[in-house]
Amino acid sequence: MTASDQLARRRRSRQDACVPIAVERDLARGWIRARANGTLSIDDVLDFIRTVRGPIQMRMWPLLFDARSCRSSITVADVDRAVELVSSLVHDQHQRRAHVALVADDDGLYRWFLEYETRCGQLGVRVIRAFRQPEDAERWLEIVSAARELS
């Protein structure tokens, strides 16, 4: 079962599942593209982080997470939970991950993404960036992916 299938199954099994996160694997580019719709909850985010790069071959694929038109009631405590999960994956389980570009046009969600980026950066995880425009996010992923391939 793929990570997308696991995420979809968990979401269907939860009573409060209200945001579909569609995941597309761009094989030509070696990227993961995710598109969220509706109201984004911390449970959706945590499930997504845990499963989207579950297969080891996906861990070094850049990820574009597009949450334009989403809304959220995520709190500072929720940001703590997401950062703790990233810390566990990266430091405790020693799972290196490729770059992540987060896109949001909702002010509240964008602030949450910026806080998440900053807090992960403080842990030494400096591969996450928040953007307002998908074109900017995509261009950043192209640049950092090309630079990573040269090193």
Image (cartoon, rainbow, N blue to C red):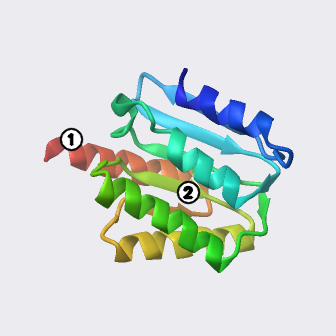
Q: Position of residue 118 (x, y in %)?
A: 45, 76
Whole-angstrom CA distance, mark 2 to mark 1, is 21 Å
For mark 2, give the secondary structure: strand
- Label 2 crowd (10 A; few <14 / some 14-19 / many >=20): many
Q: Are marks 2 and 1 in contact (CB under 8 Å)?
A: no
Residue at the spot 70% in from the left edge and 37% down from the top edge: 10
Numbered disc total: 2
Task: Evaluate whether residue 67 shows in this view.
Answer: no
Residue 149 is tagged as 1
Q: Is residue 52 left or right of residue 66?
A: left
Q: Closer to the camera, 4 or 129?
A: 4
What residue would you read off at disc 2?
102
Q: Amino acid at mark 2?
A: Leu
Is the residue 47 above or below the residue 25 in the image? below
In this picture, residue 105 sits left or right of residue 119: right
Residue 75 vs residue 144, the one in the foreground: 75
Q: Position of residue 130 (x, y in %)?
A: 53, 64
Give the mark, 2 or 1, whose residue is nearer the N terminus.
2
Residue 18, percent across and down?
A: 84, 46
What x and y, as percent, mark residue 56?
35, 32
